[in-house]
Image: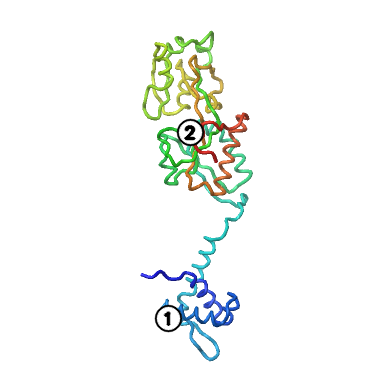
């Protein structure tokens, strides 16, 4: 099957609009003879005369009338595809972005982010969804536009990642808890009753490995799926919650936090997105908004070390 010359669509669009070989030639800056030859090619390609003589004028055939609107729309669509991207007008942007984050991220950074987005792009809506795992499927299939979290083995190799801030784990207890007084030693910390956060239903992690190296083991009473749940239980009981300090800043009000008596346990929280959205102007703007919201809370700035991909 011979592929048709798609350049003929532009000529056909002009011919059907002008109804004249001479006028179409002037509009396309061609000679009348060149336009006549192109009309002949169009007739051969479509198998229809398209324009026929009626006195001194040309009139369209029924097939030409049928094609006129379709051809015009095709040419317009093609021009739109090939046209350079227009400058982003945030005031006229109407779009919903879905962000997959932890509850702690929304609590801590959501207010500043929402205020900025509403001021700069009032037609933009942010939809926050929970993050039950670290899989990249939702970024790949487009159900999620942006994600925050720690880059790990489950993160797709194609996913773009930019560090936002570094966080460290701390212990948190209710006010009046015995660990509010005196030095918190590894033995005192391990001897308490603990609530553990795990989205993968795993009850052991880096903290337990560090304690094991000291010959200690935590008494894990319960396992929950999020930091907010862990802190809620710790607030209402004698349980000890071990959570990232900056990620839970707004969730720990009225509670006592202390450094873990262990080698520093730090994580880098990153902004994640699929590479197909790299060049999307609105998406670039939103990424900047998220980075600035984190920078406002942590003026030391985003990290550069450890980035898998810097954008």
**As drawn, which residue projects farthest toward the top?**
182
Vertical arrangement, residue 22 with respect to residue 172, above or below: below
Vertical arrangement, residue 308 with respect to residue 86, above or below: above
**As drawn, which residue projects farthest toward the bottom?**
55
Residue drawn at x 37%, y 25% as measured from the top left: 202
Residue corresponding to mark 2: 149
Residue corresponding to mark 1: 48
Quarter of the image with the C terminus in it? top right
Q: Position of residue 260 (x, y in %)?
A: 50, 16
Examine the image and state in which quarter residue 85 appears. Answer: bottom right
Q: Position of residue 29 (x, y in %)?
A: 60, 75
Q: Does residue 297 appear left or right of residue 143 in this picture?
A: right
Residue drawn at x 53%, y 17% as measured from the top left: 259
Q: Nearer the viewer, residue 85 or 144?
A: 85
How many residues crowd mark 1 within 10 Å: few (<14), some (14–19), many (20+)?
few
Vertical arrangement, residue 24 with respect to residue 300, above or below: below
How many residues crowd mark 2 within 10 Å: few (<14), some (14–19), many (20+)?
many
Q: Secondary structure at mark 2?
A: strand
**Residue 20 visible in this rendered orientation of the protein:** no
Q: Position of residue 76 (x, y in %)?
A: 53, 66
Q: CA distance from mark 2 to mark 1?
A: 61 Å
Q: Nearer the viewer, residue 114 or 63?
A: 63
Quarter of the image with the N terminus in it? bottom left
**Residue 310 visible in this rendered orientation of the protein:** yes
First reached walking from the N terminus: tag 2 or tag 1: 1
């Amino acid at each position: 099957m011979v592929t048709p010359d798609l350049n003929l669509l532009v000529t056909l669009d002009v011919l059907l609009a002008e109804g004249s070989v001479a006028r179409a030639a002037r509009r396309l800056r061609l000679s009348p003879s060149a336009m006549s030859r192109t009309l002949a090619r169009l007739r051969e390609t479509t198998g229809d005369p398209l324009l026929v003589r009626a006195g001194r004028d040309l009139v369209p055939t029924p097939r030409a009338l049928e094609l006129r609107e379709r051809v015009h729309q095709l040419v317009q669509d093609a021009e739109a595809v090939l046209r350079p991207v227009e400058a982003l007008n945030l005031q006229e942007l109407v779009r919903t972005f879905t962000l997959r984050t932890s509850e702690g991220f929304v609590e801590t950074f959501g207010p500043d982010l929402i205020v900025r987005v509403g001021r700069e792009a009032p037609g933009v809506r942010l939809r926050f969804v929970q993050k039950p795992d670290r899989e990249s499927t939702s970024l790949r299939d487009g159900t999620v536009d942006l994600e925050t979290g720690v880059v790990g083995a489950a993160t797709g190799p194609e996913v773009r990642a930019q560090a936002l801030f570094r966080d460290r784990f701390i212990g948190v207890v209710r006010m009046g808890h015995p660990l509010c007084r005196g030095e918190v030693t590894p033995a005192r910390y391990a001897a308490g009753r603990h609530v553990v956060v795990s989205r993968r239903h795993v009850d052991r992690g880096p903290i337990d490995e560090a304690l094991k190296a000291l010959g200690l083991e935590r008494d894990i009473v319960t396992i929950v799926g999020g930091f907010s749940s862990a802190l809620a239980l710790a607030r209402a009981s004698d349980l000890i919650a071990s959570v990232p300090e900056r990620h839970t800043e707004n969730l720990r009000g009225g509670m006592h936090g202390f450094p873990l008596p262990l080698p520093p346990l730090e994580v880098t929280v990153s902004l994640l997105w699929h590479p197909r959205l790299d060049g999307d102007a609105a998406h670039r703007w939103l990424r900047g908004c998220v980075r600035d919201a984190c920078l406002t809370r942590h003026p030391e700035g985003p990290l550069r070390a450890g980035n898998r991909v810097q954008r």
